[in-house]
Structures are given as C-alpha cells and as structure tokens.
Image: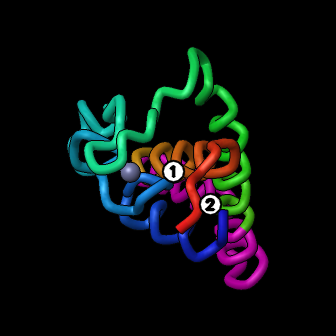
Amino acid sequence: MEFRRLVICVLKNKCPNCQVGNFFSSSVFSIKHFAEMNKKCEQCGFDFKQEPGFYFGASYVSYAMQVAIFLGLYFGMIVFYHLPITSFIIAAIVLQLFLLPVIFRASRLIWVSLFADFKKK
Ligand SMILES: [Zn+2]
C-alpha cells in the first residue's frame, strides 16, 4: 500500500481498499462505542474482519505509537524544560487516556493496511 493511501485511510478512518467506506461504525468521541467496527466496507465489500484474532497484531502497532508519544513527551518535558518527573507521569497518564481511542483506531487501520491484499487503483 502506498504511503499516501495509508495516511488518508488512517486520518479519515476509511476503508483501506477504497478510502470511501467507513471502517468504524461509530464516532471516535463515543466513549462506549469507539471500538466498534463495520464487518465489511459498504462501498467495496472489503472484509474488515479478516480472520479471528487478526487484530491481535495491532497491539504491537499501538505499543510502538505509545512509545513514540511517551518518548516525545519525555524529551519535551524532562530534557528540554527540566520539569519534575511527577509532572511527566501525570501528563503521560492524562495523554494516554485522551489518545486511547485515536491510537486504537489508528493501530487497527495500520495493521489491516499492512497485511490486506488490495486491489490496484
Ligand atoms: Zn472499501
């Protein structure tokens, strides 16, 4: 998958195959339902539930994204501004809570984009 298509489908939460159909069935701001996915793309019929346990690997993508965010926060707060470590820990926890739905969705979309067989456009 070309990088431009990956960025578009992750930012817009669209189908990685056609970039038109919605990947998730609810809003990212819905606290209870942010993780609910559509079974298939309503535009192209692409199967989002590839196989049981397919999205287990998305946890590795999520872990990498969180490490990158925490390292950026650490260097920003501790190294450049010399703030106390407790402020870093509090900021990391708060940031983690607010970014949970975004990271969850982005990691699933990146994972399915890496391993799915797409039609050429
Ligand atoms: Zn589609």
Mark seen at residue 65: none
Question: Foreground: 105 or 109?
Answer: 109
Q: Tell whether label 2 touches label 1 (CB within 8 Å).
A: no
Neighbour class for label 2 at 10 Å: few (<14), some, many (≥20)? some
Residue at the spot 61% in from the left edge and 25% down from the top edge: 54
Q: Position of residue 71 (x, y in %)?
A: 74, 64
Does residue 75 lie above or below 114 as drawn?
below
| Residues drawn in magenta | 72-99
Considering only order in the chain, which callout, 2 or 1, is on the residue closer to the N terminus?
A: 2
Disc 2 marks which residue? 88
Residue 76: in magenta span? yes
Does residue 93 lie above or below 54 as drawn?
below
Q: Position of residue 47 (x, y in %)?
A: 45, 33
Q: Quadrant of the N terminus?
A: bottom right
Residue that extends furthest to the top in the rendered view of this protein: 52
Q: Position of residue 107 (x, y in %)?
A: 57, 47
